Image (tube, helix red, strand yellow):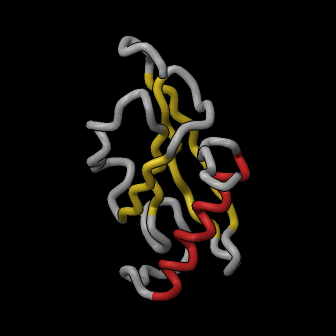
Amino acid sequence: MAPASASLVTKSLSFETNTGTVLHATVGGFGSLAQRPVIVEDSPYAPDVSTLDWVGADFNFVELQLQGTGLSQGSLDAMGPADQSVVTSSARTNRREGWLRSSRR
């Protein structure tokens, strides 16, 4: 667990989903982007309007810009099948990059 006084560290990330859509996200954590459980917020307003100010040092967070909003490509699907698919793809990217501590053994 990072000390309460640890600084917030963020990283901008763009990645291609399994549908070929390029999404943008901001990854953050206190102290470092070490492997920790991850809270994902997918929003058309990220990162300008964040509801993740309550996240403490025990978690990393990902503010995912929904497709068709912000810097993300594609068309807004408002939680439809295409949007659900790219959120799943985002979770796989987070695991591969090492910010997500997987529960699989």
Q: Position of residue 73 (x, y in %)?
A: 56, 71
Residue at the image position 48 percent from the left and 79 percent from the top = 83
Task: Tell whether 94 sits left or right of 69.
Answer: right
Q: Is any atom of residue 33 visible in this view?
A: yes
Above-or-below relation of 10 to 50? above
Residue at the image position 68 percent from the left and 42 percent from the top = 98
Q: Is any atom of residue 94 visible in this view?
A: no
Task: Tell whether 66 sits left or right of 53.
Answer: right
Residue found at the very far front of the displayed protein: 105
Task: Tell whether 20 sits left or right of 91.
Answer: right
Above-or-below relation of 6 to 36? above
Residue at the image position 36 percent from the left and 15 percent from the top = 4
State the count of labels. Answer: 0
Residue at the image position 39 percent from the left and 56 percent from the top = 41
Residue found at the very far bottom of the displayed protein: 81
Q: Position of residue 5 (x, y in %)?
A: 38, 11
Nearest to the observer: residue 83 or residue 14:
83
Q: Where is residue 84 in the image (x, y as percent from the top left)?
A: 49, 78
Nearest to the observer: residue 48 or residue 83:
83
Nearest to the observer: residue 72 or residue 60:
60
